[in-house]
Image (cartoon, helix red, strand yellow):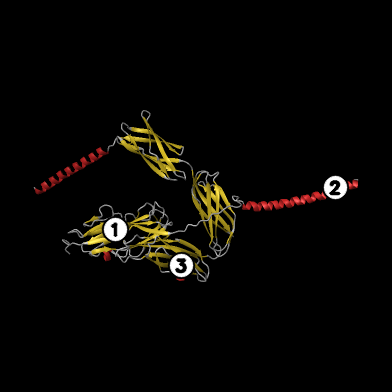
Amino acid sequence: MAMADNSYSGIVVVFAVFVFVIFLFSVGVFYLSAKTLFGTISGYATSIGEANLTVESAVTINFTTSRINWGSGRVNDGQPSAGLNTFATSNVTNGNWTLQNAGGLRIENLGNVNVTLNLSGTKTAASMIGGTSPGYRWNITSFETGSCRNATGGTDALQTNFFYVVNTTTALFCNYFQFLDDRDVIRIDFNLTIPSDSLTGALGDTITAVAFAA
Amino acid sequence: MSIKGFVLVLAFVFCISYVSSLGISPAIKNINFESGKQTNITFYVLDAVEGVEYDVNVRGGYLAQYSSVSATTVTGAGSFVLTINFPEKIDIPGEHTVSVSVKEKPSETSFINTLVEVGSIIKTFVPYPGYYGDLSLNIPDVNANDQIPVELYLINRGDNPLELSSVYVEFISSTGQSVKRVDFTPVTIPVSGDRYFRKYSDSSGIEPGNYIATGKVSYRDTIREVNRSFRVGSLFVNITNYTNSIRGDGIQRFYITLGSRWNSPIYGAYVDVNLTNGVYSTIFRTPSIDIMPWEEKTIGSYIDTKGLDGYYDLYFNASYHGQSTLAIGRLYVGDNYSIIIYSVSALLAILFFIVLYIILKRFFFKKRR
């Protein structure tokens, strides 16, 4: 009887080991199944997402005010010359021209990068106006405060009260013409001296603005 | 030359026949030198006028001779391709620039024009011999208890891979104390490769104030370092200035300057001002203003000084976002003597001229006799 008991218990042990092995196998199969299943269930995030977005840079400038017109006129009798400028007041002296739109030319940086701004005309005072001691000068200012920054990032980039002789070869006026909406407009004012013996007829020039990414 | 009667008729015009607006994209392109290979970059013309033709130009230094464009003109909002055929070798390491531009053509319908030319910059980098890491750090101003986004950027500019041994950013306070260190996992950056090291740092233990962030990377026996300042803001508006003297009776302007130490806008800040000298006391409130991050702004208000004279104590109470700042000051209210001063000056001037006239008259009278 005892021997019968022993062989019975041996069968039970073998059976128990067999059941345990099957259990381990089942756990493994369940783990793999669950992993596959959860990977396909909507809303189950298995990794950190990454969104990539590239915004292309662009250089765009616009002459928002591109016309200055003094109309027809002449130097007053007895005066050696007349003065014309593009300011709001006292824009014609010793002459009978009438400035149609005060405020100079205006350039706006419409892009999404800061740019360098080079400017040039094509004529000198002598070739455009002629006569004795003509004057053809311009003044470049930030129409919106801080529109132009210098090479080191400072705001004193433009000499606001200084009229330069208009250059016929392109010259750098602004190292960092900014693109931010509240500081992206530069103004160009002109100051002309028309001698009484100047050229006659319709006079003018081509102003070129060159902008490159800064 | 007789000028009298000389009459000239002139018309001065600076104008254009169409709107001068023009753009090009991309604005900047950074590429690496690849010996003997060809690179093509497409550029798009923006804000162009339909049907109008624009000139395309290529300029630059050494690489300009190896560069060409697919078209010398573009019509309307078109595109063109820049091709750079790199040589086998460039002797000078560093940055080599080529630029492309589009330019309006002078109008043939008008003698006078404004023209626009816009250009893109293409920077080609030729590796330096040896080991060279180009490091930059970006860290913005934040508010106290915000997460601080730290971004360290390293470009391998050398002709050998950079095996980094340590990468970290340290925050240094205005007293020189190191208050935080953000460590990154060191990696190897291949030749012409780059790597951003980005992490959010919590600002626990960081007091509001000014800080220097120092980014450091180590490779071989070299430590490369970059510094950048940033501010940690606190919800605090300081009263930095005020009107301390008023001369004259009646309604007078009174100014108070507020300085924000907060890295976000503050809306609707105002100041209650209590003016007293122990006998007389009055309270007035300024208009409310919005203050941008770290901005200093002046509020203009009015005060009736009728019947006021002498020194008064001022108690300011600035209110903003449920917080308040208290400050004290002193105001002098006095008579306006400017009219009297001007009148006396004018009388003295008249007197001077009368005396001068009498002296000169006597002098000339004596001489004639």
CA neighbours of label 3 inside 10 A, class few (<14), some (14 to 19), many (20+)? some
Q: CA distance from mark 2 to mark 3?
A: 87 Å
Q: Name which residue lies at 82% across and 49% down.
A: A13
Q: Position of residue B294 (x, y in %)?
A: 44, 45
Number of the label disc, if any, that sits on residue B252: none
Q: Left or right of B233: which side holds B246?
A: left
The amino acid on which the numbered mark 3 sits, given as a three-letter code, is Leu
> Mark 2 belongs to which amino acid?
Ser
* Tag in front: 1 or 2: 2
> Are the two marked residues, 2 and 3, in contact with CB atoms closer than 8 angstroms?
no
* Front position in the image: A187 or B348: A187
> Which residue has dot 2 on it?
A9
As drawn, the residue found furthest toward the top would be B279
Q: Which of the two residues, B280 or B332, is positioned nearer the viewer here?
A: B280
Q: Which disc, if any, is residue A68?
A: 1
Furthest-left residue in view? B369
Q: Residue at x 85, y 49 (%)?
A: A10
Which element type, helix, strand or loop, lies under badge 3?
strand
Mark 2 vs mark 3: give the one in front: 2
Instruction: Please provide percent x and percent y for residue A37.
Output: 65, 52
Instruction: Pick whichever of labels 1 and 2 is earlier in the sequence.
Output: 2
Quick one: SS at disc 1?
A: strand
Task: Label 2, secondary structure: give it.
Answer: helix
User: Label 3 belongs to which residue?
Assistant: B82
In the image, residue B191 lies at what x, y percent? Answer: 56, 63
Residue at mark 2: chain: A
Q: Let me know if marks 1 and 3 both belong to one chain.
A: no
